[in-house]
Image (cartoon, rainbow, N blue to C red):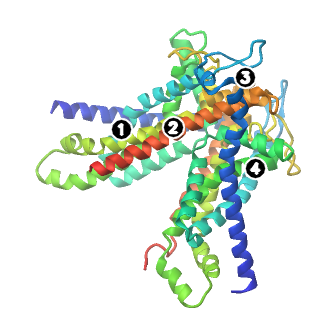
Amino acid sequence: MKNDIFLKLWSYISGIIVIGIIVFIFLYILIKGFNVMSFEFLTSSPKGMPLGTEGGIFPAIMGTIYLGLICAGIGGIFSVCTAVYLAFYSRNKALYELIMFCIRSVSGIPSIILGLFGYSFFIMKFEIPKGLLSAGFTLSIMVIPFITIRIEKQFREFSKGVFDSSLALGVSKIYTIRKIVIRKSFGKILSAIMLGTTYAVGAAAPIMFTGVAIFAKSPRSINDTFMALSYHLYMIISEGLSIEMAYGTAFVLMMLVLIVNLLCRFLWKEDSFGKDNRG
Amino acid sequence: MNYKDKVIESIIKILTLVTSVIVFFVIIFIVVESIPIFKEVGIKDFIFQSEWNPIGKNKSYGILPMILGSIYVSLLSILIAFPLGLGFSIFLCFLNSRIRRIIVSFIDMLAGIPSVIFGFLGLIIIVKMFEKNLHMASGESVLAGGILLSIIILPFIITNCLESLLEGKGIYEDASLSLGVSKWFTIRKIVLPCSMKAVFISLILAFSRAMGETMAVMMVIGNAPLMPKLLSKTETIPSLIALEMGSVEYKSLHYSALYGAGVILLIMLFICNVLFYVLKNIARKGE
């Protein structure tokens, strides 16, 4: 009995600590950050002397959104194509394993090393100017494994019955994939892309050398350097500029992540008919 | 098959090819860029020398402090996160499945928080607390990094522990309860022992994840290339790369040394992953 009490105590104490940590982190950022929120903070550029101690984070928000769009666009197209190929076209088992192995390995590479790669490869070798495009490329390499692995699994679980019935009706494979498989799992594909993108956009390490600027205007062209929320937060803290601004930036970044997370949860649940009548 | 279908099919194939080539190329590229430093300094010196001084007069490239720093911080974080995570998973086992699902979705959200935010919180809470309570000149230390990192990998550990615990619970719970054994006894004597192996093995993955963490750790450990001690500053490999890459000359030896550090990190992660798969297979065979 004594051992049971010890176990009980242990589990309750860690329960309290972990729930405490979670509640604390969310509430702390949300409350402290909410106090900083104002229309001006969201819509004006960094101001003050030194720059960044006052004003707002509008360019950082825009930069993050543009970066996310580029990353989702490039990463999404490549991932969906690769997933379609892996799930429906690859007949060669060895080739499949090789591609999967490469993708898994890259998914394990720390983001800072991908940033290093992006810097040397895109900017130095291919001489893409530092900016949205080069950072977007780097981030898409980071999200391709994340999205591909999820969508490929989704495609594999797609009802064989529906797929085969379509083929048996004389419909071509690619037409079936386009009109049935992709359309039916569209919500899940979208949510995988969105989740991957927010996770990439939240990372400051890979964009540090590939295009982010300490201060910049909202980007006007694809090769402009830009500000991003994650890097801006890092910069304000490491330079010790303003703790208030840091709370605000963290709040906006956190809200962005939470909203996308909830949206994805909703999209993922919206089930396709693919799963229940497996043939 | 009409014209349009053919075009789409070939686009799919081409893009898959491009993806695979790039993905493969990333790994090759990193290794190739690091070759000069290994040629110049030698693998042994690079790893085992403890002097990192790439800009001074007597240049030396030894990343031993960073390697040890990475390992120390990651091990410390697992040491803290594991008991908490396992205890919390046991706690979750006893809740009904609806409440459990809600809590688990919060834990998923915790996992989604960008690491910069963790770093920020670590700096203004953990580091400040150290400075106040322990009277340290600066609270940035291995311990602060370990505590912060343990929160970051906690969701990962909890998910893994919970999965194996629930699996064990599903198999034995009904039989055990119908014999009149108490719930806690069932967990302690049956569920825990049979899922322990899987839990320990998953710690290896948590460790490799902790090693790759950059921003959060970098913000709280002080970043001085010293041999790590619990309450002293140190530097990890990712933070070394992140801090010095911005100021380094393209294709110089220093640049190559940073790539070399990256390769060493990747090799360590690779060893962890191989170890994970080997142990997992052994455990599966043993059952």
Give me the disc on residue A7: none
Q: CA distance from mark 2 to mark 4?
A: 26 Å
Circle 2 sits on which residue?
A: B208
Give amino acid for label 4. Answer: Gly
Residue B216 in the image: above or below residue A150? above
Circle 1 sits on which residue?
A: B86
Residue drawn where x is 38% and y is 43% of the image: B279
Please report, as a chain letter, where disc 4 is located. Answer: A
Local crowd size for mark 1, using a 10 Å CA cut-off: few (<14), some (14–19), many (≥20): many
Q: CA distance from mark 3 to mark 2?
A: 31 Å
Give me the disc on residue A240: 3
Residue drawn where x is 39% and y is 37% of the image: B85
Q: Quadrant of residue B83?
A: top left
Left or right placement of residue A10 versus residue A186 in this view:
left
Residue B70 in the image: above or below residue B285? above
Quarter of the figure that contains the C terminus of chain A: bottom left
- The local secondary structure at tag 4 comes to helix
Q: Are marks 3 and 2 in contact (CB under 8 Å)?
A: no
User: Measured from the top left, where is residue B34 in percent x and y?
Assistant: 70, 34
- The local secondary structure at tag 1 comes to helix
Q: CA distance from mark 1 to mark 3?
A: 37 Å
Give amino acid for label 1. Answer: Leu
Residue drawn where x is 55% and y is 68% of the image: A92
Badge 3 or badge 4: first in the primary sequence: 4
Furthest-left residue in this view: B179
Give amino acid for label 2. Answer: Ser
Q: Of discs 1 and 3, which sits in the foreground?
A: 1
Q: Of discs 2 and 4, which sits in the foreground?
A: 2
Circle 4 sits on which residue?
A: A136
Q: CA distance from mark 3 to mark 4?
A: 28 Å
